[in-house]
Image: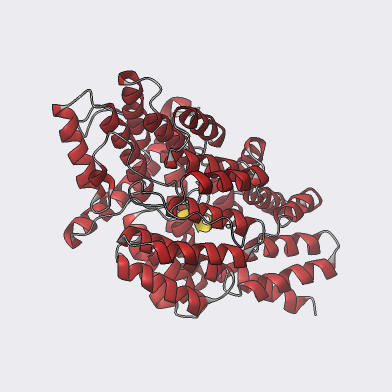
Amino acid sequence: MAPRTNHTGQERQATRPLRPGPETEPGPAEGAGSAGSSGSTDSTREAAATAARRVAAVRRFRDAGRRARGLAGCGLLLAVALSAGAVAVGSVRDGGGGVAVAAPAGAAPALLAGGDLDAQVAGLQDRLRSQPRDHGSWATLGLAYVEQARTQGDPSRYPQAEQALRRSLELRPGNDAALAGRAALAAARHDFTGALADAERALAQNPYSERALCSRIDALVELGRYGEAARAADLADARRPGIPVFTRYAYVRELRGDVTGARRVLEQALASATARGDIAYVAGQLGQLAWNQGDYRGALGHYARALAADDTYLPALEGRARARAALGDRAAAVRDLELVVSRAPLPGSLVALGELYEAGGEREKAREQYDLVGAWAALARANGVDADLDTALAAADHGDAATALRAARAEWARRHTVHTADALAWALHVNGRDTEALPYARRATATGYRNASFLYHRGVIERATGHPAEGRASLTAALKLNPGFSPLGARAARTALEAGR
């Protein structure tokens, strides 16, 4: 998944740090620039035509969402669900993620302070028509394109972001705002090695760059370098304490099994939040943390607060849908997720909606959602995004097993995280290679990260490799932790436990 730590808002004045204390482009014209093409990499015309149809499907989906937003008169803040999906795209965390956004020095901060992102982009484009040598606005525009790509499910914005950031660096070589923007772009494309390198370059120019400090944490997390990520979070907290850093600090703790510490940090962050976007974001993160622990009523309370601050905040809508589904209100969950995917057809929400349809016997509608994941992946790859983790996760359960394994192996070759270990373990399992899968399944749960899906995968693999007691313990732990972690997975876990009696 892109990093799940996401934020909206401007750079802030100094805020009290978490420590010491208990442990925490194209030209400015809209059409400038062009998306990359995947057709040249396809071996046959038929493959190229299939990819083109998939791209067109996602674009139609995206455009329908834009029309719906326009009619409703609502705009997106600079925030995104990650993963998503977990990763990427959807927080790596079980559905959702992103990179912090703060206005770079030299730009007009109000342009990124929240509201209608499309209008903000248009404002930046107008500014650059009259002031084409404003390197700060070029950097801001590049970052705004990154956020359009993520919040609107439109990866074709990434080449535009790249060109805008390049222009900023041509006008002012080595400026930290553009370097930090490149780090955010690399992270959005899941090039976490590149993101780390650009974040380090930005920090060499400005050690107090909030965005670069945050991107450095994100990159280390997504490379599986959790000890270094914890130290990077400490450094960021010392230099630029504030909500973007606090939320990352909390996630690093959660990944290492410290749920209580993560909750405490997020509660501190929420208490200090005043902007609507900040409140929505942090309350949404508290909701996700509660949902991961099976506290669905608590999660709904946090999501209600997030939506009271911003009723268009898609991660909170998606989280509310998952909580409602876990509590048995499938109809309300489907309505929420249909709204989410109409606005941002990202893999995590598409799969979640497909599984709800499938659990309700609507297989054709479910298949439509799973096919759109493939469409999104084709569009993402055409625009420089590594979509292997998303492909592996979706294909393992709802697509082609061989495709899932190829993608999971490719992702594991690039980075060793708990999420890539889990994806590779599950892809090996669906290909009947459980003996190979077991070490990866155990590695995915080795940091103490409390994730019911990981425990479910481990339990299934343990049973398949002749470890029935361990398998039963893992399946039981998954359902005890989060009994509604997946409408299909939870059902399969219960069936397996009943069959083993």
Tell which of 230 and 414 is nearer to you. 230
Residue 444 place in picture, x, y as percent: 70, 54
Q: Residue at x 44, y 51 (%)?
A: 244
Position of 228 with respect to 54 (left or right) is right
Whether residue 318 is visible: no
Q: Residue at x 61, y 72 (%)?
A: 482
The quarter of the rendered structure image containing the C terminus is bottom right
Residue 424 picture location, percent across and down: 67, 48
Task: Looking at the picture, tell me which residue is in the foreground, 24 or 289.
Answer: 24
Instruction: Note whether 107 is above or below 370 in the view shown.
Output: above
Q: Nearer the viewer, residue 41 or 264?
A: 264
From this view, report whether residue 300 is shown above or below residue 256.
below
Residue 54 at x, y percent in the picture: 40, 43
**444 on left or right of 393:** right
Is residue 225 visible from the viewing direction of this image? Answer: yes
Residue at the extreme left of the image, as rendered = 130
Instruction: Identify the residue shown where x is 36% and y is 54%.
Output: 344
* Image x and y of residue 147, in percent: 35, 44
How many marks can you see? 0
Q: Is residue 492 above or below residue 233?
A: below
Is residue 287 rendered to the left or right of residue 125? right
Which colouring convention does the figure follow?
Answer: secondary structure
Of residues 187 and 174, the one nearer the viewer is 174
Residue depicted at 37% across the width and 30% down the height: 178
